[in-house]
Every structure is written in structure tokens, then in C-alpha cells.
Image: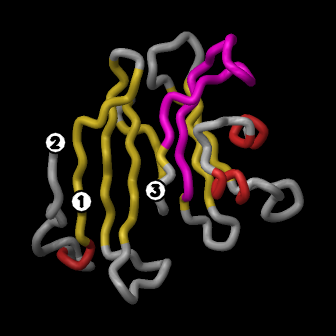
Amino acid sequence: MVALLKGDARVGDDVKKSLAKPCAADAYPVEVAYASLTGGKSPDVIVNVLTCADSVGIGSYVYRRDRGAPGGYENVFADEEPTVSAAVNKGELETSTQFYDTGDEVCCPSGEVVKNYHWSDGRFTKYRDHETDYSKTTALGSGPAGGTGSEG
């Protein structure tokens, strides 16, 4: 998977630099999951690239099986917004990105933006996003639910 990322023109230079060497032994900072997102015969590959030091997401990608593409896979989604992480939710692609206010520690973001994507007409289209402001929620789960963002 690392070779595929390094050879992909859609993967940014900063992400490629993070893949120059493993974090420890032969462990690269890459998480891989498989799911059927694009309707192909083979499962799609969801790849998250993290930092070695603190496991913060720096790139998320979806690859679709394409025997004519280099390495046999075509990059059909890329997001390199800092702290990004991609996953599958109810059979569709979902990304989450944490955001930080001035003074927030890496462990403790101020909130999160979740974006949902649907595959249609040969590409992923965002159909919803939702922002949760952690400062507006309580430890016991009561009080206002975080929901300061937009849907659309």
C-alpha cells in the first residue's frame, strides 16, 4: 500500500515524505480498510495516513480496483486536510476532521466536522456535513448537543 501511495500523483509531497521510512521496524503510519463503496466487483480500499509521533491523520484516500491503472488501483478520493480520517458509515464514505482553537492540546480538540459522501456518476459527492463543538456538550451527555454546523 505504501508503494501505491508514493506513486500516486494525487498524494501530496508532505504525505509522501511521512512515508519515506517506517515509524518503527517495518510499521508505516498507514491504516487500511476494505469496503464496497463504488459498486465495483472488488472491494474498495480506504487508506488513512497518520503521523508517526502522535497518530494524527494527514491524508485519507479511496482506491478503486482498476486493472488498467498503475498498481491496479485508481484513486477516486483524496483529502489531505490535517487531522482527517476516513471510514465507512452505513455503506458510504465518511470523513471526520478535528479542529482546534488556540491553546488546544493535540489530545483535546475543540470539535469535529463530519462529512458524508455518496458515490454516483463515477465520483464521490458530499451530501452532508455536520460540525460538533465539544465545548457545547457535557461530560454526562446532557445539555445542548453539538450541532453548530451546517447540513447540505
Q: Amino acid at mark 2?
A: Gly
Residue at the right extreme of this rendering: 25
Q: In this rendering, is residue 67 above or below 11?
A: above
Q: In this rendering, is residue 92 above or below 97?
A: above
Gap in angstroms between the C-alphas marked 3 and 2: 19 Å
Mark 3 or mark 2: name the one nearer the start of the chain: 3
Residue at the bottom extreme of this rendering: 103
Gap in angstroms between the C-alphas marked 2 and 1: 12 Å
Mark 3 or mark 1: name the one nearer the start of the chain: 3
**Residue denoted by label 3:** 81
Mark 2 or mark 1: name the one nearer the start of the chain: 1
Please report the residue visible at 45 percent of the width from the left and 15 percent of the height from the top: 39
Q: Quadrant of residue 38?
A: top left
Q: Position of residue 18 (x, y in %)?
A: 71, 59
Label 3 with label 2: CB-CB less than 8 Å? no
Determine which of the numbered discs, if any, sits on residue 152 in the image. 2
Q: Amino acid at mark 3?
A: Glu
**Residue denoted by label 1:** 131
> Looking at the figure, which quarter contains the N terminus?
top right
Q: In this rendering, is residue 98 above or below 138?
A: above
Which residues, given as a range, are shown in magenta? 58-78
Q: Position of residue 36 (x, y in %)?
A: 49, 23
Please report the residue visible at 59 percent of the width from the left and 31 percent of the height from the top: 45
Circle nearer the viewer, 3 or 2 = 3
Please report the residue visible at 83 percent of the width from the left and 58 percent of the height from the top: 21
Dot 1 falls on a residue whose secondary structure is strand
Q: Quadrant of residue 138?
A: bottom left
Q: Magenta region's main secondary structure? A: strand
Q: In this rendering, is residue 98 above or below 143?
A: above
Residue 88 belongs to magenta span: no
Please report the residue visible at 64 percent of the width from the left and 54 percent of the height from the top: 15
